[in-house]
Amino acid sequence: MTLALTAHRLEFTVEALTPVALNEHQGAALRGALFHALRGQERGSWAGFCVQKHLASCAECMAVAACPVAALVSTLDPAAERGRDVPRPYVIEPPLDGRTRLAARERLVFGITLFSHALALFPYVILALRALEEVGLGKVVGEAGWRRGKVRLVGAQATNPLTGARQAVLRPGETCVSVPDIPVTHEQVLAAAQQCSAGRVGLEFLTPTRLVEQGRLLKHPEFGPLFHRLWQRVADLSREFAGDAPAPEEGYMLVGKARRVRLVEDHTRWVEQDMF
C-alpha cells in the first residue's frame, strides 16, 4: 500500500501587542480565531474572505465550492461517501506550556498541519493569521470587556519531525512568504515505522482525547478503537485531499490486528471537562 497523502507541518510565532487572555482549551480557541479571521468581521477594516456573511451556514452559499473559508474550516461535499461533511484538511497543534495569559511583547508558538492539496490554501492561512492583529485572540479582556487581545504574526517555519528538516517560510520583519517544501510523505512514515522495535508501543496523549466506540464512551485508551479512528481519519483525508484511498480490505485487516493489541500499562486519567 502506497498513499499520496502528505502532511505539511507549519510552526507559527505570534507576539502579543496587548495583554491576551488565553482559553483553557487553546486548540479550540486557535481554531475559532482562524475561522473568524478567514471569515472576516461584520464591522471593521478586515473583511476576510466570506462574501455572504448574512447566511446561516456555508451550505447555503452558492460560492461554497470555491471558498477558502469552507475549504479549510467548514468542509462540505454533497457527493462524499460518508455524508456531506468531510474532514477538515488541517490539524492545529496548540502550545503546551500551560500559559493562560500573555503580556504585551510575549510570544506564543503553535503548529498547523495542512494535508496534501490543502497546501494551496497556505496563503489564506498566512493572511488570516496576520489579521489577528485586528480580529484578536483569546477571551474578551479589558475592564469594559470589549475586545480580545491583539497579536502579530512575526514568523513561520515549515518543519518535518521525521527528517529534522526546517524551512523558514516567513522571517521576522519580512513580508515575503515562501511555499513550504519539506512535507512528511508516506515513504518517510514507513521508514520511521521500520525503526520501531516490535513488541510494545507507547502512546503519549498531549491534549485531552475523547474516544467513542459503538456509542460507548471509553474511559481508558483501548488501542483497537484508537487505531480504528486514526485509520479512518487517514483514509478520509487521503480520499478527499490526495485523490486516493487505501483499499477497504487493508483497513479491515489492520484494524483486526490492532484489536488484538492489549493495554498493559495505563498512566492516563479521566477528567470531566466543560467544553463550553
Image (cartoon, helix red, strand yellow):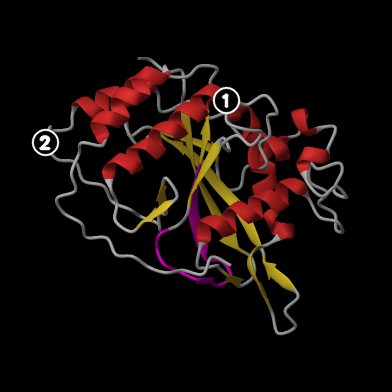
Element under disc 1: helix
Badge 2, how many Cα within 10 Å: few under 14, some, many 20+? few
Residue for point 65% across, 32% down: 121
Can you see residue 173?
yes
Can you see residue 176?
no
Of labels 1 and 2, earlier in sequence is 2
Kindly identify the amino acid type of the residue bearing the numbered disc 2.
Gly
Q: Position of residue 105 (x, y in %)?
A: 56, 66
| Quadrant position of residue 96 | bottom left
Alpha-carbon distance for marks 1 and 2?
Answer: 34 Å
Q: Position of residue 70 (x, y in %)?
A: 71, 38
The count of marks equals: 2
Kindly identify the amino acid type of the residue bearing the numbered disc 1.
Glu
**Residue 171 part of the magenta-drawn span:** no
Looking at the image, residue 141 lies above or below residue 173: below
Residue for point 42% across, 45% down: 214
